[in-house]
Image (spheres, rainbow, N blue to C red):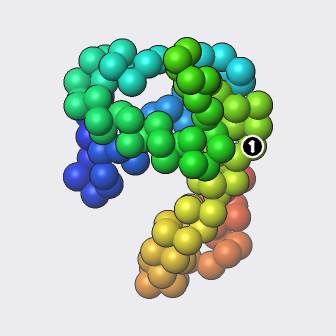
């Protein structure tokens, strides 16, 4: 896994897990890789993966069955979309909107470009 410098590693791992859930590689009520297994796969310290799992557990995206492992919550996809939507609105749209203003890109021009995608 290639890590970016502008975001903490544990959050990038959390995003990786969320992506696997959204693409249904890991579906609801199914067991996800153990902390050690995932740490080995992406070549990071198990404590970093555990921090990602703790964060996702706090958000209700995964849950722990003591002694068995971590599982995907039933509403995980919905919760991920809500969380990522809010993050996108708060952190990416302001910069995007500022850039649109600087470049004199109207909402009409943006809408045409958006529809073409």
| For residue 113, above or below residue 40 | below
Q: Position of residue 104 (x, y in %)?
A: 52, 83
Helix, strand or loop status at disc 1: helix
> Is 23 in front, or is 51?
51
Q: Residue furthest front?
A: 67
Q: Quadrant of residue 71?
A: top right
Q: Which residue is mark 1?
A: 78
On the question of residue 116 being in view, the answer is: no
Q: In the drawing, does residue 41 fall left or right of residue 63?
A: left
On the question of residue 84 being in view, the answer is: yes
Q: Position of residue 7 (x, y in %)?
A: 32, 54
Q: Position of residue 57 (x, y in %)?
A: 57, 41
| For residue 77, above or below residue 114 | above
Question: What residue do we see at 39% from left, 24% from top?
Answer: 35
- Number of numbered labels in the structure image: 1
Q: In the drawing, does residue 75 fall left or right of residue 10?
A: right
> Is 42 in front, or is 55?
55
Q: In the drawing, does residue 59 fall left or right of residue 5?
A: right
Q: Residues within 10 Å of mark 1 (few under 14, many from 20)?
A: few
Question: What residue do we see at 28% from left, 57% from top?
Answer: 6
Question: What residue do we see at 69% from left, 54% from top?
Answer: 82
Question: What residue do we see at 50% from left, 66% from top?
Answer: 92
> Is 36 in front, or is 8?
36
Q: Position of residue 64 (x, y in %)?
A: 58, 29
Quadrant holding the N terminus: top left
Q: Quadrant of residue 19?
A: top right
| For residue 84, above or below residue 43 | below
> Is 75 in front, or is 111?
75
């Amino acid at each position: 896994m290639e890590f970016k410098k502008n975001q903490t590693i544990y959050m990038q791992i959390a995003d990786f897990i969320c992506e696997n859930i959204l693409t249904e590689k890991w579906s609801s009520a199914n067991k996800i890789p153990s902390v050690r297994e995932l740490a080995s796969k992406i070549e990071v310290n198990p404590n970093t993966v555990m921090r990602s799992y703790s964060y996702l557990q706090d958000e209700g995206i995964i849950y722990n069955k003591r002694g068995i492992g971590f599982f995907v919550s039933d509403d995980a996809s919905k919760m991920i979309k809500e969380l990522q939507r809010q993050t996108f609105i708060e952190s990416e749209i302001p910069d995007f909107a500022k850039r649109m203003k600087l470049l004199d890109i109207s909402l009409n021009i943006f809408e045409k470009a958006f529809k073409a995608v």
